[in-house]
Amino acid sequence: MAEEQDELTVVDHLTELRRRLFLVAFVFVAVLVGAFFVVDPIYHYLTINALSGVEIELNAFSFWDGVGVYMKIAMLVAFGITLPFTLFQVWAFVSPGLKPKEQKATLKYIPFAFIFFLIGVAFGYFVVFPLAMTFTGSLNKQLGLIETYGMADYFKFLTNIVLPISLLFELPIVILFLTQLRILNPKLLKKMRRVAYFALVVVSVMITPADFFSAFLVLIPLILLYELSVILSTRVHKKQLAADEERKKQYEQ
């Protein structure tokens, strides 16, 4: 009988997960349709050099370059807009296993997750991407190359820099969420500091051009974000310990 109840619980969880994934997919598609109406101004904005303000001349090297770039911009816009809704669905899926106080605490992370994502997008586009363009452009001139940019390659280069950075800026929110679920704690984060720093160094080198300055510029905020995560995790963990101690005293009475 107990095994049947466990199986029903698993089936119920899978059904609930499928329902929430369907909701996320439905909202994403709906927003994607609306995003097509704003692709044109976004495209022209993203093709203006952030340093000089001059529009970059892009070329299509295949018949599908324009369609591919158009779809990529629309999907990125839809991803950014639906991110809060997606995070809410994640919270709604795990919240039944949380205590009422933990439910309220973790729900507050959703708007901050969206804010940190936008900060990451801004940092990647206005700081890292211009540095990457300057570095690659100066190297091309040094080699005597004529710069002819393909639109697909340009937006792939842009996306490969901005999107990973914006997702990495979610690090404090993810760590806080896992701390609230008691999966992580400050002691473990401090113990993992060296490994985390090494991983951040690898990531910063992978998403920036092959020059020390750009990688260092990305690495510094990532390390600060990790240390901020440790501080915030410590505060949450202390509140959890205090709440546990209070419940223990009430139980003993």
Image (tube, rainbow, N blue to C red):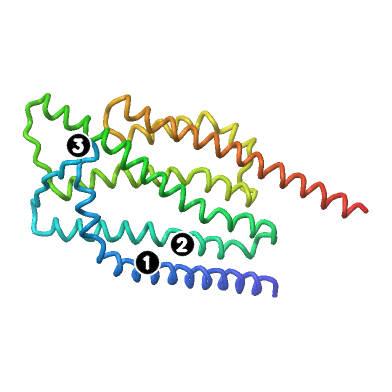
Q: Which badge, 1 or 3, comes first in the chain's sequence?
A: 1
Where residue 60 appears, as percent x and y from the top left, is 9, 52
- In which quadrant of the rendered image does the N terminus lie? bottom right
**Image height of 74 relative to 237, above or below:** below
Local secondary structure at mark 2: helix
Q: Mark 2 and mark 3: span between their CA atoms?
A: 37 Å
Q: Residue furthest right?
A: 253
- Residue under circle 2? 86
Amino acid carrying label 3: it is Ser
Query: Which comes before the other along the chain, label 2 or label 3?
Result: 3
Left or right of 2, for residue 52:
left
Q: SS at mark 1?
A: helix
Which image quadrant for residue 74? bottom left
Of 68 and 9, the residue lying toward us: 68
Please state the horizontal and vertical placement of residue 30, each as a whole percent of the image: 35, 71
Q: Which residue is mark 1?
A: 28
